[in-house]
Image (cartoon, grey):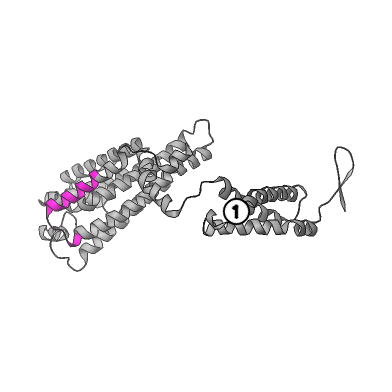
């Protein structure tokens, strides 16, 4: 068949020959591709004056070619190539390209803290859930030590349970490390908290219920461990050992839980949007905060290593932990000006 029939007038419309079409326009496509590649690898300053003047003309020509290719059902590979070429050209012509360093600077200066600040209600809820779990477990174990074994897994306890001696518990927080026990316990604790943060975020889509339960359970484990050490007269020392890195680590978990709750509430109460659309929108708004959570967990890991290996004084441990908490609060919630990219967007 060599012609298409026009539906309105019945006049045959000639088909576009793919080979001839490509031969007539491929030189322009290739030049546009080369110009865009040079901009992507270097910058627009890599182009000469003639290239800059030709760029919008080549882009419009490529759009016209794409329209013809779609309407006449040319081969799919050509349509895909033109779609990708036009998309790349669009972002270079009409987007606001910034360097990697500029993007990182904007992330740390305003993107990350603003994302966390927007979650302040959910973060406050996560704080109360964690505290409620810790207080509940502490009270239960203070009255009946057997509750400890229902809350703390054996891998985490690793001998630090109500039956442990004062000397064993003291070795956990002071003095030289014995047979790698402290290192194993600390590594397990960090891995566990990282998993809690990830799951608190990832499971938020289930109407936020799993995220809330994880935060309560994490608080219960914290309260259970404090209760064991407090019964041996080491509660203040153990809290200091946790504080040096725990203020950062627990804060990160609460933010991750806040992200999960934001997604869960969006799914439960989507308003006029479809549930999937509401979940996607909430996920995009919390993704930046979760990137910050990863950074916080890395900082917590370094603080835990320093505190475990070099700092033995309770006052120093509390001082570092409280200073980190104050620093995070100031970083997140201190009012700040919009970044350059945000001003450009507005």
Could you say which is closer to the camera, residue 270 or residue 141? 270
Magenta highlight range = 308-326
Is 265 left, or right, of 125 in this rendering? right
Magenta residues, dominant SS class: helix
Could you say which is closer to the camera, residue 312 or residue 105? 105
Residue at coordinates 49% horizontally, 34% vertically from top-left?
270
Is 218 left, or right, of 36 in this rendering? left
Could you say which is closer to the camera, residue 159 or residue 346? 346
Determine the secondary structure under disc 1. helix
Residue at coordinates 76% horizontally, 60% vertically from top-left?
23
Please say whether residue 196 is one of the residues in the magenta stretch.
Answer: no
Residue linked to disc 1: 49
Rendered location of residue 331, percent (x, y): 29, 43
- Residue 221 in view, yes or no: no
- Residue 56 in view, yes or no: yes
Determine the residue located farthest toward the bottom in the rendered image. 179
Residue at coordinates 24% horizontally, 50% vertically from top-left?
246
Rendered location of residue 88, percent (x, y): 59, 52
């Amino acid at each position: 068949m060599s012609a298409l029939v026009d539906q309105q007038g019945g006049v045959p419309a000639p088909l576009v020959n793919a080979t001839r079409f490509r031969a007539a326009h491929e030189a322009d496509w290739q030049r546009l591709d080369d110009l865009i590649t040079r901009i992507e690898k270097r910058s627009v300053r890599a182009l000469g004056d003639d290239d800059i003047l030709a760029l919008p003309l080549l882009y419009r020509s490529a759009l016209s070619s794409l329209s013809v290719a779609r309407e006449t059902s040319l081969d799919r590979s050509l349509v895909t190539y033109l779609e990708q070429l036009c998309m790349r050209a669009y972002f270079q012509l009409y987007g606001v390209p910034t360097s990697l360093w500029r993007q990182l600077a904007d992330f740390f200066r305003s993107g990350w803290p603003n994302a966390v600040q927007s979650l302040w209600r959910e973060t406050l809820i996560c704080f109360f859930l964690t505290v409620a779990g810790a207080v509940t477990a502490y009270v239960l174990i203070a009255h009946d030590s057997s509750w400890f074994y229902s809350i703390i897994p054996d891998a985490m306890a690793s001998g630090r349970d109500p039956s442990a001696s004062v000397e064993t518990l003291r070795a956990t927080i002071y003095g030289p490390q014995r047979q790698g026990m402290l290192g194993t316990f600390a590594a397990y604790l960090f891995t566990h908290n990282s998993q809690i943060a990830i799951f608190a975020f990832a499971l938020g889509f289930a109407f936020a219920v799993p995220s809330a339960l994880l935060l309560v359970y994490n608080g219960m484990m914290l309260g259970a461990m404090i209760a064991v050490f407090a019964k041996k007269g080491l509660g203040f020392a153990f809290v200091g050992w946790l504080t040096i890195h725990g203020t950062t680590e627990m804060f990160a978990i609460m933010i991750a839980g806040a992200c999960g709750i934001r997604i869960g509430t969006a799914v439960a109460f989507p308003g006029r949007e479809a549930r999937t659309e509401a979940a996607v929108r909430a996920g995009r708004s919390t993704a930046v905060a979760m990137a910050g959570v990863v950074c916080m967990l890395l900082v917590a890991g370094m603080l835990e290593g320093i505190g475990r290996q070099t700092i033995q004084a309770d006052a120093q441990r509390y001082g570092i932990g409280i200073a980190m908490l104050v620093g995070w609060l100031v970083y997140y919630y201190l009012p700040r000006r919009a970044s350059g990219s945000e001003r450009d967007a507005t």
